[in-house]
Amino acid sequence: MQRRHFIKISAATGAAMLFSKLTYSALNGAAMMNAPDEVWAQSGTDWVKLTASNGSHYANKEISVSLKTNGNALGVFVSSPKQELNAIRLKWKHNTAASAKFLGDHWERSYGDLQWKTIAAGIKNPWYIIIHDDKQTACFGVKTGANSICWWGVNNDSVELTLDTTSGGVGVLLGDRQLHAADVITTNAKTGENTFTATHRFCKMMCEKPRIPKQPVYGINDWYFAYGNNSAELIKKTTAMMAELVTDHSNKPFSVIDAGWATYSPLLPGDGGWNDDFSKPNDKFKDMHALGDEIKKLGMRPGLWMRPLCAKHDEKASLLAPKIPGRDDPKNPVLDPTIPENIARIKHNFDVYKQWGYEMVKHDFTTYDIAGRWGFDMKDSFTSPGWHFNDRTKTNAEIILHLYGSIREAAGDGIYVIGCNTMSHLSAGVFELCRIGDDTSGHEWARTRKMGVNTLAFRLPQHNAFYAVDGDCVGLTKDIEWKRNKQWLQLLAESGAPLFISGQPEAMGEEQKKAVKTAFAQAAKVQPLGQPLDWMETITPTKWKLNGRVVDFDWA
């Protein structure tokens, strides 16, 4: 198979090497995706093959795709003036080596299921895919901030990239505008570069302008011992307790107030209620400005949790997103993110947080509130079919990007933003931090091991390439053996990534305090990026390179 069928090598890159049936530049890992062998488009339920012309243009009736060199990437531009457009698929001929292993990403958070796979057929690999055999590592992806939701597929004789352009659960109506759907990018490992390092470098290539915290981020969060049953007094108590363990006062930690602080509204008399107004505290907190000031006096930086698209219990129906499977609970009405009034409300909430003096906001549930699904349920499609938001002229990716951009604009430079349940590739370059995995636990060690260790191992290459990766908290409670949490604490503290601890006061003995004090000191400074050395053999790596030494963990 000839080079022109898959990757075009720049004349300046020098000699090429062979990886399976793909050809790569051997100099600096540089390569350029060439035009695909086939281009398909989906309108409604029908797929049609587009006819190539001029080497870079493909069309079928009014649907057209143009491919343009865009820096070091191949830009994909799509037009469909009259027909709804659900997806575009690019296909390259390629025979995959039988010995190859494959690593993809997740749509939003990961769920303890990331791994190097040996069987690739039929699997969607969100955003990027790393292909490795005994001789070489190859990386294929789309740049962050794409205007479509993208995934890669590998078959015996081809590699495919699908660009989902749906709006809600139907095809987008582009009208006369051309959609810049994505920028496709590739590289291969340099000589002597292992798969982890190559993946980390590729993540930097996919996100050219990450938004990185000025200093390493660490601190505390009350969720994994309070689970919403918190109060201003509890926050002050735990902040004071943990502040005594801080030694680096040039980089102060954060005290993040999790769910439980905002105004609640009951659905029925006697009902426990739910958060519905994230600009007002409830009676357990009363004055969030005063609490923030108290946290600062104790030596930490105040932060809080919120749910941007949560609607009020008596919300006007015209402002709500349509009810769909997974998004039809009357206790959790959801705002339509395509309505300007709703975006203005979200931005107002952040204005309030700035007035209160908070320096970090963790926002949650946006993917679920938009799609009605968690990432692990997006196997067949992003959301259920047959519905759309108020504005059907924007793709789901564009709707999400506008929401994230509005949050960023409202937060300004004075608030660090953590996205939780955010679309990873769309939040990169927008938010300083991302909660990269599903919840760890203050009750179940097996959950922390599954969600925490797996998540950190396989998404650590994204650290300070997309954002600072938050592998979630150490749920330091009496329900989990200290010998277990001690290891999770050490891994987070020495990984180079953010460290957050949920320290139950009753579980904080002298041994725990001593370990936390050491962990805080480590997490407060810049460290080498940790590496899981056995990540190609197990989904829960036990052998890690941390600060230049090999550390073995016993997660069982």
Image: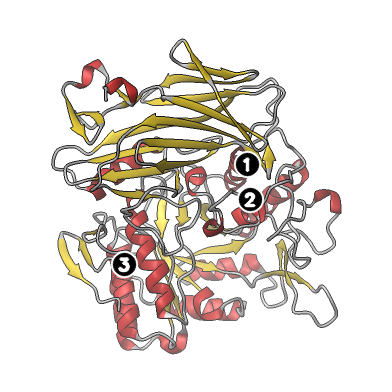
N-term-proximal mark, 2 vs 3: 2
Q: CA distance from mark 2 to mark 3?
A: 30 Å
N-term-proximal mark, 3 vs 1: 1
Kind of residue at disc 3: Thr
Residue carrying label 3? 540
- x%, y% of residue 69? 41, 19
Asked if residue 26 can be seen in this view, the reply is no
Total number of numbered labels? 3
Say above or below: 526 vs 223.
above
Which is nearer the eye, 232 or 229? 229
- x%, y% of residue 163? 53, 36
Location of the N terminus by quadrant is top left
Which is nearer the eye, 445 or 123? 123
In the drawing, does residue 30 fall left or right of residue 550?
Answer: right
| Mark 1 secondary-structure assignment | helix
Q: Are marks 1 and 2 in contact (CB under 8 Å)?
A: yes
In the drawing, does residue 156 fall left or right of residue 300?
Answer: left
Residue visible at 24% across and 28% down in the picture:
23
**Quadrant of the image occupied by residue 209:** top left
- Considering every residue shown, the one lying at the far front of the view is 156
Asked if residue 32 can be seen in this view, the reply is yes
| Mark 3 secondary-structure assignment | loop
| Mark 2 secondary-structure assignment | loop
Which is nearer the eye, 505 or 146? 146
Mark 1 crowdedness (10 Å alpha carbons): few <14, some 14-19, many ≥20 = many
Location of the C terminus by quadrant is bottom left
- x%, y% of residue 394? 67, 35
Residue carrying label 2? 383
